[in-house]
Amino acid sequence: MTAPTVEAAIHERMDLAWNLVYDLLQERGLLGDGLDVEEYTGIHSWVDGPTRYTVVHSRQVAVLFLDTRPVDAIPFHHDLLDADDPKTFFSL
């Protein structure tokens, strides 16, 4: 179970771009596990220069957003959470 504020942030990010996230997951062959918004339980966000990076993840999939636009999706692995620069795991 996630905290209500974390859950709200995840839903806000995913709901605004759900069609784009769906297309991105489909392009990367990641549809299936992690498809439902309810399955996303983690969010990590940071600012680098003028850009806000946000990673939203389920136990299976991680999606990278630049500002509010999803730009890449990868299979989730825990190394992503401990990385100094999580965006290096994604293709930009």
Image: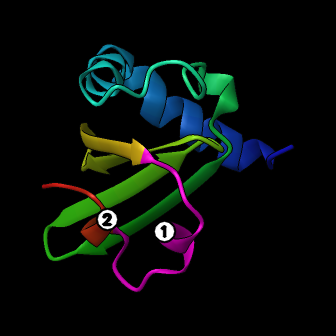
- Image coordinates of residue 7 in percent, x first then y, are 69, 40
- Mark 2 and mark 1 lie on one chain; the one further toward the N terminus is 1
Farthest-out residue, top: 19
Q: Residue at x 57, y 30 (%)?
A: 11
Q: Is residue 50 magenta?
A: no
Q: Amino acid at mark 2?
A: Phe
Q: Is residue 28 above or below residue 49?
A: above
Disc 2 vs disc 1: Cβ atoms closer than 8 Å?
yes
Where residue 68 sits, quadrant-wise, is top left
Which of the two residues, 53 or 60, is positioned nearer the viewer here?
60
Dot 2 falls on a residue whose secondary structure is helix
Where residue 47 sits, quadrant-wise, is bottom left
Mark linked to residue 89: 2
Mark linked to residue 69: none
Q: What crowding class fits label 2: few (fewer than 14 Cα within 10 Å), some (14-19), or many (20 or more)? A: some
The quarter of the image holding the N terminus is top right
Start-end of magenta stretch: 75-86
Q: Which residue is mark 1?
A: 80
Q: Is residue 81 magenta?
A: yes
Q: CA distance from mark 2 to mark 1?
A: 7 Å
Q: Is residue 50 above or below residue 64?
A: below
Q: Amino acid at mark 1?
A: Leu
